[in-house]
Image (tube, grey):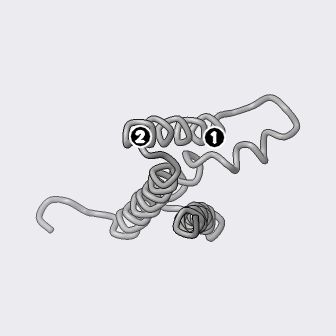
Amino acid sequence: MIGVNLDLGLLAAATLGLFLLTLCFSAIGLYLSALSESPAIAAAGSYGLLLLLSILGQNFASETSGILRWFGWPGHLLNLQLGLVKSSDIAYFLLLTLFFIALTLHRLNHRRSQ
């Protein structure tokens, strides 16, 4: 490339992080959409849950701060944006995505059987 030295590894890690975050946010929104009849309620619920997960990533001054911090997504995304690809960060996003997709499928199957 002309005039720019891109760190392709850093770019790939950051792109992977944004892709995994998009998957996770979409799965959460899909689940809350399956729970409610109204799109506005689903959007507000998704925003609230994502805000809660964001707040959990902040620093707490208690003994359980490590556990609570692990449930927040900002720290996991930050590692990937800095180019640090850790299997625990990838597992976090994939497990959260699969968890909410499984909840969505369970909810839809339950609704279909009624």
Q: Quadrant of residue 41?
A: top left
Residue found at x 45% / y 43%: 42
Say whether disc 2 or disc 1 marks the residue closer to the N-terminus. 2
Residue found at x 45% / y 56%: 30
Residue found at x 45% / y 35%: 44
Front in this rendered view, residue 71 or 1: 71
Structural crowding at the residue carrying mark 1, measured as other residues with C-alpha within 10 Å and reported as few (<14), some (14–19) or many (≥20) = many
Identity of the amino acid at label 2? Ala
Where residue 49 appears, x then y in whole percent? 56, 40
Q: Are marks 2 and 1 in contact (CB under 8 Å)?
A: no
Q: Give the residue at mark 1.
A: 57
Front in this rendered view, residue 2 or 99: 99
Looking at the image, residue 93 sits to the left or right of residue 30; the answer is right
Q: Secondary structure beneath disc 2?
A: helix
- Is residue 65 placed above or below 77 in the rendered structure? above
Q: Give the residue at mark 2.
A: 43
Residue found at x 88% / y 37%: 63
Where residue 21 appears, x then y in whole percent? 46, 56
